[in-house]
Amino acid sequence: MSRLFLLIAIAALVYLLVRSFRKSDAPQDRSDAEDMVRCVHCGVHLPKSEGILAGGQFFCGVEHRDAYRK
């Protein structure tokens, strides 16, 4: 009977350890994530802060902005 209790206690301990490790592997905070935009000229996706906004549209560089205007 004592072996049964020991096996149950070990199984419960393993279960709790596995459960706690799974929670710690989950993504914590996504506050550093940034919106992505697509260059109208070439279709490349880039962070919004790196894109060039012109005429309400985003471009990946000055060259593509100028080429799109022509």
Image (cartoon, grey):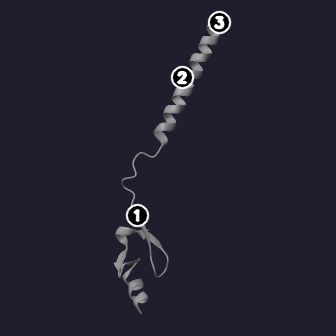
Q: Position of residue 8 (x, y in %)?
A: 60, 17
Against 15, residue 35 (above or below) is: below
* Mark 1 / mark 2, whichever is N-terminal: 2
What residue is drawn where x is 52% and y is 32%? 19
Residue located at (52% from left, 28% from top): 17
Name the mark on residue 35.
1
Measure the C-alpha gap from mark 1 to mark 3: 60 Å
In this view, which residue lies farthest toward the front?
56
Q: Which mark is residue 13?
A: 2
Amino acid type for the residue under numbered disc 2: Leu
Give the Cα distance between marks 2 and 3: 19 Å
Q: Is residue 64 left or right of residue 9?
A: left
Residue 58 figure quarter: bottom left
Q: What is the secondary structure assignment of the residue under circle 1?
A: loop
Name the residue type under label 3. Met
Is 33 left or right of 23, judged from the image as shown? left
Q: Residue at x 43, y 70 (%)?
A: 37
